[in-house]
Structure formats: structure tokens, C-alpha cells
Image (spheres, rainbow, N blue to C red):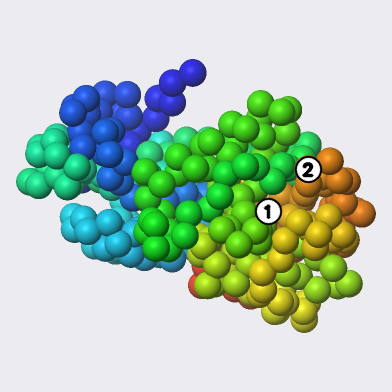
């Protein structure tokens, strides 16, 4: 079913389904685009609120720099465009997808004079991994696909082309009737899921891959680390493999789309608890924050009123 909402495209608000992109757009052939996933939540006090909007736009700008593409708009302009697009759609809760990509021009791999297009699309989207997954936990598989190293691809950018690995890992898990695929790094340590960061809990301590690992430095991951520190939960950013995952007390995924989703199974192993007590706490505090509750909400939530348009 087509998403038929109003979008912001190259500075103008228009119907998403009326935007025309050339079949020879460079990004369609070579994956030359940068994107973000952002969520807007209905606020407990009323109105809408976009969670960590500026942080996401700063990462988009960094991704464009990594790609070597000049972002046509400032971070302030893009943040304002997100709010404008949500207001035009009368959405106080939605998923937001900014995308910067190369259009038709030089058709060689390196491109040339290709125009840079900027899109902000919004739609209403529920739980990415399902309501049951949010409540009871998802079933995951350590797939046969390896997370690319930093010497092989620009892994710190959220770039369209390099998500083919995630696509393949997710499809492998789905083909086996599971919910999500996990990827190891070259050395056999857990890197991340197809579209989320991965956390395990053992003896009351949260473990996750360190910043130096081949992972995307997720905005939601950073939020989880902050919540844990705020609540005095011990953290260890270090590498771990299959054995540590199989013997964990609990585990969860973090991501803008997935939010905080418990993991109940890895390969054929059921974890000890799903959701466990620490997962429940992190999930509850996260869902409070995004809806404007908690001390950090004022700095992290960009609020707006639908009647202000």
C-alpha cells in the first residue's frame, strides 16, 4: 500500500506520490544517498514532539560529509522543515525519513555534476518489530553475513548503499521464520542487528559493543547509555561473542524504529528472561522521555503545536 502523505522535497511541500525521480538517478544505481530515521511522539502535555531532532540532523550532515556530498540546507533549515512537514500532515505522532541523494547526471560510478536532492517524508508507523515483540521480545538469528569493517566501507555514515548487508541479514532471518538478524564482525564478535544496536545484560550490568567496533553510533544507543548512567546501572562497552550472548540474563535492541525491543531468543537459545528487569526499566524510561517526561526531555524533544501552522 502506497504511502500518500505530504512531503518536503527540495524546499517545497508536495504530495509524496507526485514527486518525480529519474530512473537514471545516480542513487538508484550506486546507493549514493544518506538518510536518517526519526520519530515524532504525541506529548503527554499535548502537541507533538520530535525526539533528538538536531542530533539526527547533525548525523545526516556528517553522513553527507563522509559520502562527499554537499548538503544543500543547513541543520536549522532541515529541523524547521521536519516540523513544517509534520504540521502540514497534521501529525503529532509519526516516523520521519530525511533522505539526501544524488540525482540524474554523470552516470559513472564516481558521478560528477549530479544534482543533490533532499527529501523529508513522514508517515504513521507503529512498532517496527511488532507489538508482541515490544512486549514479549523478538526471536533473532546470528546470520551468515559479516558487518563490514571501516577499511572496507564508510561504516560511520548512515548511507543507503551499505544497507544491502542489513537487507540480506534481515531476509535470511525472515526466511527462517524469525524476527531479526544479527551480524558479527570480522573477528567473530557481535556488532549489531540489521537496523538496531544490540545490548545484553549479565549480573545487573549492561554490555554493548564499544564505539571502536564496526557499528553505527545510534542516537537511540546513546540515549540508552545515558538512561543507564542516570539510573546507576553499570555499563561495559566491550566486545562479546556467541557464548556471552547465549548465557546472558536478558538482551534488547535499540533503534529509532525499533525503540527498545526485548530479545527473547538468539539462534535456538531462549534467554533467561524477556523482558528482564533492566530491559523493562530502560524501555519504560525511554518511552517516558520521548513523550516529554523526565529531566532530559526539555533538551531532547522539539515540541510543536499543530494549530500553529
Q: Neighbour class for label 2 at 10 Å: few (<14), some, many (≥20)? A: some
Residue 255 position, x and y percent, is 59, 53
Task: Looking at the image, tell me whether mark 1 or mark 2 is earlier in sequence order.
Answer: 1
**Which mark is in front, 1 or 2?**
2
Query: Closest to the observer: 297 or 304?
Result: 297
Quadrant housing residue 172: top right
The secondary structure type at the circle numbered 1 is strand
Q: Is residue 41 visible?
A: no
Query: Closest to the observer: 132 or 213?
Result: 213
Quadrant housing residue 13: top left
Say the numbered circle drawn on residue 49.
Answer: none
Return the residue at label 2: 267
Say the numbered circle drawn on residue 253.
Answer: 1
The secondary structure type at the circle numbered 2 is loop
At horizontal 30% and vertical 28% (from top left) the residue drawn is 15
Residue 27 position, x and y percent, is 26, 38
User: How many numbered marks are there?
Assistant: 2
Query: Closest to the observer: 152 or 300?
Result: 152
Q: Is residue 129 visible?
A: yes
Query: Closest to the observer: 18 or 193?
Result: 193
Residue 183 position, x and y percent, is 61, 50
Question: Is 26 situated left or right of 99 in this image?
Answer: left
Question: Is 25 situated left or right of 180 in this image?
Answer: left
Quadrant housing residue 18: top left
At horizontal 47% and vertical 60% (from top left) the residue drawn is 149
Residue 281 position, x and y percent, is 80, 63
- Is 244 located above or below residue 166 in the figure? below
At horizontal 68% and vertical 53% (from top left) the residue drawn is 253
Amino acid at each position: 500500500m502506497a504511502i500518500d502523505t505530504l512531503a518536503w522535497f527540495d524546499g517545497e511541500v508536495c504530495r509524496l506520490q507526485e514527486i518525480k525521480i529519474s530512473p537514471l538517478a545516480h542513487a538508484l544505481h550506486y546507493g549514493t544517498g544518506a538518510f536518517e530515521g526519526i520519530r515524532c511522539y504525541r506529548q503527554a502535555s499535548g502537541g507533538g514532539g520530535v525526539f533528538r531532532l538536531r542530533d539526527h540532523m547533525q548525523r545526516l550532515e556528517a553522513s553527507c560529509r563522509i559520502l562527499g556530498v554537499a548538503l544543500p540546507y543547513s541543520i536549522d533549515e532541515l529541523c524547521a522543515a521536519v516540523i513544517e512537514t509534520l504540521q502540514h500532515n497534521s501529525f503529532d505522532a509519526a516516523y520521519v525519513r530525511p533522505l539526501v541523494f544524488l540525482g540524474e547526471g554523470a552516470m559513472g560510478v564516481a558521478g560528477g555534476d549530479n544534482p543533490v536532492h533532499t527529501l523529508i517524508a513522514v508517515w504513521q508507523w507503529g512498532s517496527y518489530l511488532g507489538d508482541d515483540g515490544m512486549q514479549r521480545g523478538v526471536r533473532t538469528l546470528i546470520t551468515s553475513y559479516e558487518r563490514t569493517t571501516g577499511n572496507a566501507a564508510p561504516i560511520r555514515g548512515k548511507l543507503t548503499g551499505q544497507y544491502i548487508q542489513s537487507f540480506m541479514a534481515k531476509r535470511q532471518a525472515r526466511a527462517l521464520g524469525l524476527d531479526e538478524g544479527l551480524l558479527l564482525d570480522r573477528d567473530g564478535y557481535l556488532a549489531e542487528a540489521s537496523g538496531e544496536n544490540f545490548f545484553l545484560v549479565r549480573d545487573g550490568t549492561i554490555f554493548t559493543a564499544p564505539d571502536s567496533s564496526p557499528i553505527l553510533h545510534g542516537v537511540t544507543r546513546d540515549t540508552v547509555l545515558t538512561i543507564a548512567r542516570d539510573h546507576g546501572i553499570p555499563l561495559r562497552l566491550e566486545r562479546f561473542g556467541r557464548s556471552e550472548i547465549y548465557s546472558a540474563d536478558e538482551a534488547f535492541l535499540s533503534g529509532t524504529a525499533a525503540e527498545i525491543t526485548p530479545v527473547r531468543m538468539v539462534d535456538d537459545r531462549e534467554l533467561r528472561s524477556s523482558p528482564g528487569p533492566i530491559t523493562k526499566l530502560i524501555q519504560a524510561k525511554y518511552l517516558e522521555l520521548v513523550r516529554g517526561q523526565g529531566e532530559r526531555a526539555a533538551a531532547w524533544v522539539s515540541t510543536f503545536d499543530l494549530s500553529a501552522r
